[in-house]
Image (cartoon, rainbow, N blue to C red):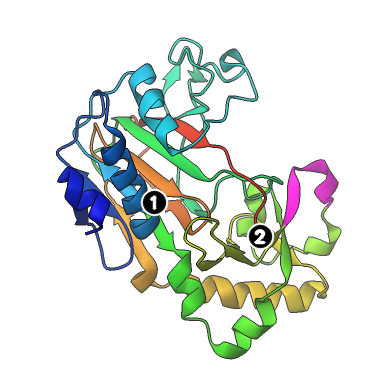
Amino acid sequence: MSLAAEQTSLVVRPLSPALGAEIVGVDLRQELPAETVAAMLDAWHRHLVLLFRNQSLSEDEQIRFARHFGGLQERTRPAEARNEAAHIKHPEVTMLVSNIRENGKLIGSLPDGEMHFHSDQCYLEKPANGTFLYAIEIPGQGGDTLFLNMYKAYETLPADIKARVDGKKALNAYIYDSTTRGVNRAKLDFSAHPHFAQPIVRTHPDTRRKALYVNRLMTWTVEGMTDDDGSALLDRLFDHMEQDQFIYAHQWRVGDLVLWDNRCTLHARTDFSDKERRMLRRHVVRGDRAF
């Protein structure tokens, strides 16, 4: 435990050998002293994913706490456009992740099914630093979130693959059907979708550690390589980094608040029954260009 954590008696309980820690016994509705916030930031940098259980948070309380970790992004579309207006009021609530329908219309986004590993907003010039997700309604089974330690994924790469990827960039695009790896990517019109070329190996600005920064859901091509060669390299990276030893699987409970670092983790979702309700409230910590 760090000095900051010791000074504030913050209890940090690791969640798995791969990554993740639970911060125990803190009521996030309360104003937190600077020393406690510093200890939480330190725990975030060491464990990559933080879990706060048994929280009962309003939008305002969740936002107030989230701001300790950086400036929050505002919604780019009005809540009315996604039928969320009756359920969220603050512009810094960027999304309801929900499959709930009212009058036949979804009240949120990303409603059903599984989702492959990805990093939030990796297709933007300045992708998100962190993401907060707060559980309001949770199905009895499934809908788990898997987190992947991209530091360890990079550090365990064979030396020859490290040499091939260091200094290279890969194109990330907001095209969800990229999970079908047999697609002929050369025929795709990336200009029709948000996209940006990111470094395959990213350096975290706070820890200075290197992490892989590609993902199966939205990374498409490698700059300076043919489509076939780039695809082969990416598939090798995906197969390497998605090993169980790098993953923590979070089973949600109502009242869970989870924060993850998009600069050094990926996350995915397991499937769940469309007969059960699921709703989580999301905030995003603004980021800078990756390097």
156 left or right of 122 in image: left
Of 148 and 276, which appears nearest the observer? Answer: 148
Q: Secondary structure at mark 1?
A: loop
Residue 156 visible to the viewer: yes
**Is the Cβ of the residue at disc 2 closer than 8 Å to that at disc 1?**
no
Q: Which of the 4 quarters of the picture holds residue 164?
A: bottom right
Q: Secondary structure at mark 2?
A: loop
Residue 18 image offset from top left, x and y in percent: 32, 67
> In the depicted view, which residue is nearer to us: 128 or 225?
128
Q: What numbered label is drawn on residue 291?
A: 2
Is 140 positioned to the left or the right of 243 in the image? left
Which tag, 2 or 1, sits closer to the chain's start?
1
Q: Residue at x 53, y 59 (%)?
A: 204
Foreground of the two, 256 or 126: 126
Mark 1 belongs to which amino acid?
Thr
Span colored in magenta: 189-197
Q: Position of residue 16 (x, y in %)?
A: 25, 63
Q: What residue sits 59% from the left and 78% below the top?
A: 236
Residue type at mark 2? Answer: Phe
Residue shown at 41% from the left, 37% from the top: 132
Q: Residues within 10 Å of mark 1 (few under 14, many from 20)?
A: some
Q: Residue at x 57, y 43 (%)?
A: 128
Alpha carbon separation for disc pair 2 and 1: 31 Å
In front: label 2 or label 1: 2
